[in-house]
Image (spheres, helix red, strand yellow):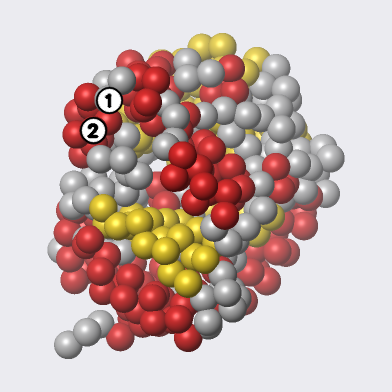
């Protein structure tokens, strides 16, 4: 029997996340494994009098990995004209990660992954600035379940438990927390190997109440670009990027820029990411995880960054909609767990301890 949660999930994506309007051209990027969800989405979009524009491949990449491994560098770093046209003319974008293998990108050398990120930047530019509605989400697959150390039925229950929430109620709860951060000039994060201060003066955050990401469950900021000072150790969870793991990443910031970086494993990946461009060494986002349905690490950044009791920093591009000015070809989220010995201070006042709000 079809899982009734798929229809509810599709309804949430079309009606809440995108609020699809008649006549829109809604571009959906996904893989063949997401077919059950795609079909429900197509029905829901059709009922709203809009077009669905499918981009369905073997992987989430707009170009295939075999092609990316052999293509001339000058081609790999640029979008083809037809994709640039789609980016310029789509009315909404939905990206559904439904991988067959979460490590499929690991065969590509770092310089090719950097060029892929550069090419994607044009495609994503209208969504990074919130010019058009967009949502990034997933569909439960065996690969995602395996990464989370769960069976597929267990993962499905966990997945929908984090997505099918009362998002209006969650939004009100997070808004009350955000207001306290908006009133602060700086936030200080203290934890294992960590004492980091970020400037928020003149910047206001935004609540993700299940619209641009699914699952939602965070509020986030674009910190002042030259005000990040101190050190942060991402020692609890490995960061997974392009199918490769970076464990124990340690970053030292001076005047907003990473001046020293190391890792217990995957240090070459970390340094390659930091050297992508000038903006890659600055913080583009500070996010505060609040989703009550996400209680454990899953090697799945879309979920892990929303875990209640965690914070995450994104190196690279910032969201202009919250005042960000940093530009980069990357936007790489790294998650810090504060549930054991971690603290958040706002203008010197203790606001959270061990993951609990005070």
Quadrant in which the N terminus appears? bottom left
| Secondary structure type for disc 1 | loop
Inter-mark Cα distance, 2 to 1: 6 Å
**7 on left or right of 332:** left
Q: Judge whether 267 appears above or below 185 on screen.
A: above
| Secondary structure type for disc 2 | helix
Mark 1: few, some, or many residues within 10 Å (few <14, many ≥20)?
few
Circles 2 and 1: CB atoms closer than 8 Å: yes
**294 on left or right of 325:** left
What is the tally of numbered marks visible in this picture?
A: 2
Q: Position of residue 68 (x, y in %)?
A: 27, 30
Residue found at the far top of this picture? 259
Residue at image position (18%, 47%) is: 101
Q: Position of residue 302 (x, y in %)?
A: 42, 52
| Number of the label disc, if any, that sits on residue 71 | 1
**9 on left or right of 172:** left
Question: Which residue lies under the disc numbered 2?
Answer: 67
The front one of 256 and 273 is 273
The front one of 8 and 38 is 38
The front one of 143 and 353 is 143
Q: Quadrant of residue 107?
A: top left
Can residue 70 be seen at all in this image of the molecule? yes
Q: Position of residue 232 (x, y in %)?
A: 52, 27
Q: Position of residue 173 (x, y in %)?
A: 65, 69
Q: Quadrant of residue 80?
A: top left
Residue at image position (31%, 76%) is: 39
Residue at image position (62%, 57%) is: 132
Quadrant in which the C terminus appears? bottom right
Residue at image position (35%, 35%) is: 241
Q: Judge whether 347 appears above or below 109 on screen.
A: below
Can residue 9 be seen at all in this image of the molecule? no
């Amino acid at each position: 029997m079809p899982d009734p949660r798929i229809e509810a999930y599709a309804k949430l994506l079309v009606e809440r996340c995108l609020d699809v309007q008649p006549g829109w051209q809604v571009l959906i990027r996904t893989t063949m494994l997401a077919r059950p969800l795609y079909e429900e989405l197509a029905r829901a979009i059709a009922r709203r009098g809009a077009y669905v524009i499918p981009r369905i491949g073997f992987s989430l990449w707009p170009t295939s990995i075999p092609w990316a491994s052999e293509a001339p560098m000058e081609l790999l770093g640029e979008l083809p004209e037809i994709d640039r046209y789609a980016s310029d003319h789509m009315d909404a974008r939905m990206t559904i990660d439904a991988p067959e293998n979460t490590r499929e990108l690991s065969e590509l050398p770092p310089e090719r992954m950097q060029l892929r990120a550069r090419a994607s930047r044009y495609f994503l530019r209208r969504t990074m600035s919130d010019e058009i509605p967009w949502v990034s989400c997933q569909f439960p697959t065996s690969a995602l379940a395996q990464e989370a150390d769960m069976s597929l039925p267990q993962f499905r229950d966990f997945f929908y438990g984090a997505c099918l929430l009362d998002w209006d109620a969650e939004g009100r709860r997070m808004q009350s927390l955000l207001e306290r951060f908006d009133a602060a000039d700086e936030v200080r994060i203290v934890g294992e190997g960590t004492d980091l201060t970020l400037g928020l003066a003149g910047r206001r955050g935004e609540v993700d109440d299940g619209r641009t990401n699914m699952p939602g469950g965070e509020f986030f900021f674009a910190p002042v670009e030259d005000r990040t000072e101190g050190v942060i150790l991402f020692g609890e969870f490995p960061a997974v990027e392009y199918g490769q793991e970076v464990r124990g990443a340690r970053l030292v910031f001076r005047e907003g820029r990473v001046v020293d970086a190391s890792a217990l494993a995957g240090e070459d990946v970390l340094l390659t990411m930091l050297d992508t461009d000038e903006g890659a060494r600055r913080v583009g986002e500070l996010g505060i995880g609040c989703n009550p349905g996400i209680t454990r690490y899953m090697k799945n950044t879309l979920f892990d960054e929303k875990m209640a009791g965690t914070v995450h920093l994104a190196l690279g591009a910032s969201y202009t909609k919250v005042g960000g000015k940093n530009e980069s070809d990357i936007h790489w989220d790294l998650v810090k767990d504060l549930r054991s010995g971690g603290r958040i201070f706002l203008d010197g006042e203790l606001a959270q301890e061990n993951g609990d709000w005070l």
